[in-house]
Image: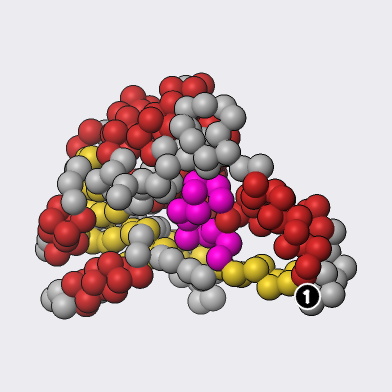
Amino acid sequence: MAEHAACLQRAGDLLEARMPEYAALLVHEGGKTWGDTVSEVREAVDFCRYYAEQALARLGEQTLPGPTGESNVLRLHGRGVFVCISPWNFPLAIFAGQVVAALVAGNAVVAKPAEQTPVIAQRFVELLHEAGVPRDALAWLHGRGETVGAALVADARCAGVCFTGSTAVARSIHRTLAAKDGPIVPLIAETGGLNAMIVDSTALPEQVIDAVVQSAFRSAGQRCSALRLLALHESVADGMLAMLKGAMAELRVGDPAELATDVGPLIDD
């Protein structure tokens, strides 16, 4: 376990040291603005360090009480090969979180990134190998979800699935896993949502508008966590909406490689 955690700590250090390189990849491949890329690389670094610390604190051998004098020891072990399927809107952070969590728990990983953003995932896999993760414990497979992803989930050797994406695909994966014979295969799924903000009459308008603009328009709104429903108390609604219109008018849509850009492109047609 200490060796697994040390690999993740080294990976976090390497990634932090190479932030400009990975940020540029996120701009080029994912269409992210520079501010978004810095946040995403930092999140991926945090995932590496967090799971390393959690593994040392929680996954080691534990001595349990022996009420009648017996010796009881709890040892945790990996399940086998985990299939990790990640999205294009956080092609580094979510990819990293899925992969390193499965690895540090003692599993091998087959990682299938979104077909729109394979390169950033490939580069992170290379970084993990450099940090000491064995090559036969982590494989990067590029392809479409309905072909490569579906084949990986249906394979008899799949011992677990981590998936972030649409609710419809998560349900399809669930049905595939449920139809298998043998032990239950766990599915860890993070899907879409309809996120709301409720604003009462005591809220500070400047803070509300900043939070709304950040949540609704970062990544051009292409996030499961993006604000989609804003509920304003009638006593402050008119003023808030006027401020919001003014803030939105200041947003600059354009090339994400330009520092002045606030909202970059959609990922595809």
Q: Is residue 149 left or right of 210 when viewed as pictured? A: left
> Going 16% across and 78% down the picture, which residue do you hit?
179
Badge 1 crowding class, 10 Å Cα cut-off, few under 14, some 14 to 19, many 20 or more, is some
Looking at the rendered structure, the kind of residue marked 1 is His
> Going 30% across and 71% down the picture, which residue do you hit?
168
Q: Nearer the viewer, residue 22 or 79?
A: 22
Asked if residue 46 is positioned above or below residue 13 in the image, the reply reads: below
The quadrant where residue 76 appears: bottom left
Residue 201 visible in the picture:
yes
Report the number of discs: 1
Q: Is residue 121 left or right of 136 when viewed as pictured? A: right
Residue 145 lies within the magenta run: no
Residue 227 lies within the magenta run: yes
Quarter that holds the N terminus: top left
- Outermost residue toward the right? 202
Q: Which residue is mark 1?
A: 233
Q: How is the image coloured?
A: secondary structure
- The boundaries of the magenta stretch are 217-228
> Going 15% across and 53% down the picture, which residue do you hit?
148
Residue 1 visible in the picture:
no
Q: Nearer the viewer, residue 48 or 172?
A: 172
> Going 51% across and 70% down the picture, which residue do you hit?
194
The quadrant where residue 229 appears: bottom right
Asked if residue 147 is positioned above or below residue 198 in the image, the reply reads: above
In x, y percent, where is residue 243?
76, 55
In x, y percent, where is residue 211?
69, 54
Q: Is residue 235 left or right of 20 when viewed as pictured? A: right
Q: Nearer the viewer, residue 118 or 4?
A: 118
Q: Is residue 262 left or right of 155 when viewed as pictured? A: right
Asked if residue 52 is positioned above or below residue 210 in the image, the reply reads: above
In x, y percent, where is residue 32?
46, 38
Element under label 1?
Answer: loop
